Image (spheres, grey):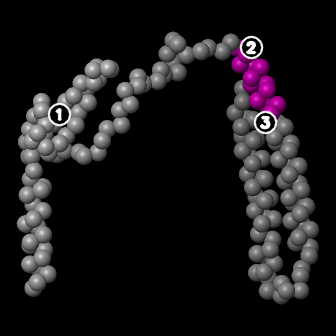
């Protein structure tokens, strides 16, 4: 029974706070001329309008920085690249991707060789086959990673013009 009394008392004390008057204040920044809206429960606020209690009010501050939105890439001010420059960039990119692909294929071959060497050895403490699998797991993960990298590089090369 005392718990109910505590809850009723807490609700009675908190409920007037929920029904407090809310004022909307619009201020103009003299330097930039931008308007800023703030909400307050203070009666001392000047040039503020009292809001109806039925309207929902968000207490999360806005994120306006006052900066103009960035121009879209299709706007006239966006820099253009000549077709010769673009072809040269594409050729450089293709060369770079082919170099990365060759490096990744060499790394895959080395990782497979290391996996085969590790798989050929069985230590005396590996009577349980799971111990051997656990020891080989990093080698298998390295092989799988190189295979995924090669697949991604080949896909990237196929997407080039």
Range shown magenta: 83-97
For disc 3, the neighbor class at 10 Å (few under 14, some 14 to 19, many from 20) is some
Local packing at callout 1 (Cα closer than 10 Å; few below 14, some 14-19, many 20+) is some
- The C terminus is located in which quarter? top right
Location of residue 34 with respect to 139 vertically, above or below = above
Q: Nearer the viewer, mark 1 or mark 3?
A: 1
Q: Earlier in the sequence, mark 2 or mark 1?
A: 1
How packed mark 2 is, by other alpha carbons closer than 10 Å (few <14, some 14-19, many 20 or more), is: few
Q: Residue at x 30, y 41 (%)?
A: 61
Disc nearer the start of the sequence (3/2): 2
On the image, the x and y values in percent for residue 108 come to 84, 53
Whether residue 134 is visible, yes or no, is yes
Q: Which quadrant would the N terminus be assigned to in this image?
A: bottom left
Q: Which mark is residue 97?
A: 3
Report which quarter residue 46 is drawn in.
top left
Residue at 27% over, 24% down: 29
- Judging by the rendered image, the residue that carries numbered circle 1 is 25
Give the labeled residue for mark 2.
84
| Horizontal side, residue 81 vs residue 78: left or right | right
The kind of secondary structure element at disc 3 is: helix
């Amino acid at each position: 029974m005392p718990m109910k009394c505590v809850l009723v008392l807490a609700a009675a004390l908190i409920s007037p706070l929920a029904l407090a008057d809310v004022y909307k204040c619009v201020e103009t920044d003299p330097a930039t001329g931008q308007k800023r809206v703030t909400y307050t429960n203070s009666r001392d606020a000047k040039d503020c309008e009292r809001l109806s209690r039925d309207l929902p009010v968000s207490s999360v501050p806005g994120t306006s920085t006052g900066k103009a939105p960035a121009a879209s890439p299709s706007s006239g001010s966006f820099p253009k690249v000549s077709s010769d420059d673009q072809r040269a960039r594409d050729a450089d990119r293709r060369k770079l991707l082919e170099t990365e692909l060759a490096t990744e294929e060499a790394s895959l071959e080395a990782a497979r060789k290391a996996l085969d060497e590790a798989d050929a050895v069985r230590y005396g403490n590996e009577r349980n086959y799971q111990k051997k699998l656990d020891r080989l797991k990093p080698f298998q993960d390295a092989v799988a990673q190189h295979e995924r990298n090669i697949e991604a590089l080949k896909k990237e090369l196929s997407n080039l013009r």
